[in-house]
Image (spheres, rainbow, N blue to C red):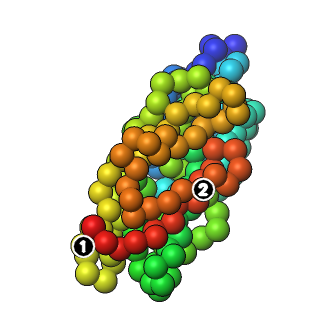
Amino acid sequence: MVAVHTVEFYPEKDYGGAAVTSELNKVEHLALGTKYLSYHLGSGTKLLVWNHSNYYDQEQWVSDKSSLPAGKQCYKVLAGATRVIGFRFKDATGGAQKAYSLTLNIHDIGQVTLYSNESDQFAIAGTMPQDGPPVTTAVYVRDMRTGIYIVQGSIYFKWDSDRQKVVIADELNWPKQLKHEEDGNDDFTITLISKDP
């Protein structure tokens, strides 16, 4: 029996080999499909999994897997009620596709870089427990042609108990060059609206 809020990973398919236990908030990069080939979830637990080279390619796994599908190498162990925040990055200043990069420094997960108008999918922008404390993520926007950072700041996420979703607390030093729009539960479109510092 797997303990509550843990995951038991196995080095072989069909739960073969010695189990390795991971607890809440544990993150490992490049482990799924190589180091671990199957797992059992404890009660109240889910896995946020993603492709190491493509943060748009992410899923939440909520049941045991006797054989891991290809394409996801990284994971974070989450409580079942934890929300995964998603971003996509758009440019309204007239720049070419991928003219700007939006880099997020996400606690536990690391650095995630999105490019302007690159995708309509949502990439990982953070995680937040329901009713949890606010989460802060550093954000930088860079002009890829000049190499100059035109935005440096922080994004503050908080739980809105009335709406039962994550929201951006834009009153707290929101970068003036960016606007944000809610795009479904816990997903946001971030748009560059000015290149002026």
Q: Are marks 1 and 2 in contact (CB under 8 Å)?
A: no
Label 1 and label 2: CA atoms lie apart by 25 Å
The residue at which mark 1 appears reads as: 148
Which secondary structure lies at badge 2? strand
Instruction: Determine the residue positioned at 70% across, 33% down.
Output: 163
Residue 155 x, y percent position in the rendering: 42, 46
Above or below, 188 against 92 in this view is above
* Residue 9: x %, y % from top left: 58, 31
Residue type at mark 1?
Answer: Ile
Among the 4 quarters of the image, the one containing residue 166:
top right
The residue carrying pointer 2 sits among few (fewer than 14), some (14 to 19) or many (20 or more) residues within 10 Å by Cα, namely: few
Q: Secondary structure at mark 1?
A: loop
Residue 107 location (% of width, % of height): 39, 39
Three-letter residue code for mark 2: Glu
Relative to 1, say whether 149 is above or below: below
Quadrant of the snapshot with the C terminus: bottom left
Residue bearing the label numbered 2: 181
153 or 130: nearer the viewer = 153
Front in this rendered view, residue 125 or 64: 125
Which labelled disc corresponds to residue 110? none
Count of labels in the image:
2
Looking at marks 1 and 2 on the same chain, the residue that comes earlier in the sequence is marked by 1
Q: Can the viewer see residue 119? A: yes
At horizontal 47% and vertical 49% (from top left) the residue drawn is 30
Is 155 left or right of 74, judged from the image as shown? left
In the image, residue 192 above or below residue 64: below
* Residue at x 61% of width, y 26% of height: 130
